[in-house]
C-alpha cells in the first residue's frame, strides 16, 4: 500500500500561513485517513530539509507518495483558491 502525505511548509511569521492553517486542517479531516497531512515550520527544522524539499516560498503545500514529491501548490493567493488548488492536486494525483 502506498502512503500518501500532504506537507504544508509554513513559518510562524507568515500571515498567509497562519490564516490558511485552519482551512488546511479542515481539508485534512476531509481526507483522513487516506492522506496524512503534516505542517512543518521551516524555522524549526534543519535548513537542509527545507532545501531538499525545494521550498522557496511560504506557504508551500506538497503532495508526497513513497518518499517522492508528486505535486505542489505555492499558496501566495487567497485562501479559498489555495484550498481549491490543494483539493484539485490531491484528487488528480490520487483519483480520490
Image: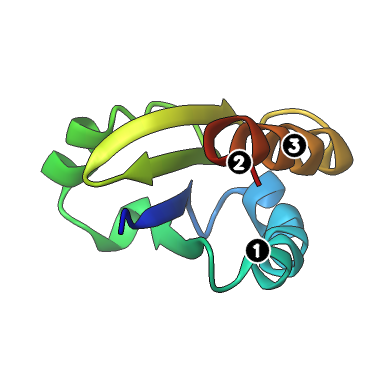
* Most foreground residue, 92 or 9: 92
Disc 3 secondary structure class: helix
The numbered mark, 1 or 3, whose residue comes first in the sequence reads 1
- Does residue 13 appear left or right of residue 82 in this picture? left
Q: Which residue is mark 2?
A: 90
Marks 1 and 3: which is nearer the front? 1
- Does residue 21 appear left or right of residue 54 in this picture? right
Residue 39 image offset from top left, x and y in percent:
47, 62
The numbered mark, 1 or 2, whose residue comes first in the sequence reads 1
Q: Residues within 10 Å of mark 1 (few under 14, many from 20)?
A: some
Q: Are marks 1 and 2 in contact (CB under 8 Å)?
A: yes
Q: Which residue is mark 1?
A: 31
Q: Name the residue rendered at 69%, 58% in the picture.
A: 24
Q: Residues within 10 Å of mark 3 (few under 14, many from 20)?
A: many
Residue 46 image offset from top left, x and y in percent:
15, 53
* Most foreground residue, 15 or 72: 72
Q: Name the residue rendered at 46%, 39% in the picture.
A: 62
Residue 28 image offset from top left, x and y in percent:
64, 65
- Does residue 45 appear left or right of residue 89 in this picture? left
Residue 54 image offset from top left, x and y in percent:
29, 27
- Does residue 40 appear left or right of residue 73 in this picture? left
Q: Which residue is mark 3?
A: 82
Disc 1 secondary structure class: helix
Amino acid at each position: 500500500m502506498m502512503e500518501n502525505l500532504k506537507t504544508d511548509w509554513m513559518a510562524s511569521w507568515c500571515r498567509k500561513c497562519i490564516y490558511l492553517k485552519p482551512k488546511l486542517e479542515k481539508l485534512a479531516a476531509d481526507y483522513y485517513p487516506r492522506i496524512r497531512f503534516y505542517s512543518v515550520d521551516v524555522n524549526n527544522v534543519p535548513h537542509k530539509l527545507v532545501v531538499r524539499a525545494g521550498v522557496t516560498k511560504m506557504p508551500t503545500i506538497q503532495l508526497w507518495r513513497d518518499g517522492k514529491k508528486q505535486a505542489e501548490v505555492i499558496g501566495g493567493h487567497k485562501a479559498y483558491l489555495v484550498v481549491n488548488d490543494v483539493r484539485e492536486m490531491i484528487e488528480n494525483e490520487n483519483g480520490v
